[in-house]
Image (cartoon, helix red, strand yellow):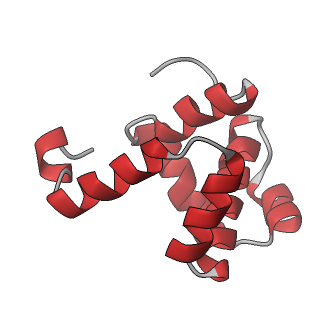
Amino acid sequence: MAERGARTSGDKDALFKAILSLETLEECYDFFEDLCTMKELEDMSQRLTAARLLLEGSTYEQIVRRVAISTATISRINRCIQYGSGGYKRILRRVDGTGGEES
């Protein structure tokens, strides 16, 4: 994946700092409902669920039936899990104990 310096920008840093400042689930709902469309929130939620299912060993077909997203999106998520920076695994391990070994 890209070097840290190549990924940063003032606008993205400000966004991520804002996210890191959220303290409660209610604050998260309030902020993300203002920031994103309902479709964007649904898409992000589905991607996280698909990542969890991939890490638990589900097949693409099982995920499509459960989450109703395309196999192309599942494939992209799988590439991120296999070759990305470890974000999905790290977050899922923190949230619910899934995510496999530390990368």
Report the residue that reaches farthest toward the left.
5
Give the vertical position of 68 relative to 89 (above or below): below
Total of numbered circles in the picture? 0
Q: Where, by quadrant of the figure, is residue 85 drawn?
A: top left
Going 16% across and 58% down the picture, which residue do you hit?
A: 10
Q: Quadrant of residue 31?
A: bottom right
Would residue 43 be seen by someone viewing this image from the given angle? yes
Q: Residue at x 81, y 61 (%)?
A: 61
Could you say where residue 48 lies in the image, as x and y percent from the top left?
A: 65, 52
Q: Nearer the viewer, residue 35 or 62?
A: 35
Q: Vertically, is 7 above or below 37?
A: above
- At a point 67% along the width and 80% down the height, the residue shown is 38
| Residue 39 x, y percent position in the rendering | 65, 81
Q: Quadrant of residue 58?
A: top right
**Any part of residue 99 in sight:** no
Quadrant the C terminus occupies: top left
Observer-nearest of 25 and 74: 25
Query: What residue appears at the point 76 percent right and 45 percent down from the top-left corner?
Result: 53
* Left or right for 19, reference 42: left
* Position above or below: 23 against 59: above
Q: Quadrant of the N terminus?
A: top left
68 left or right of 13 in image: right
Q: Position of residue 30 (x, y in %)?
A: 63, 65
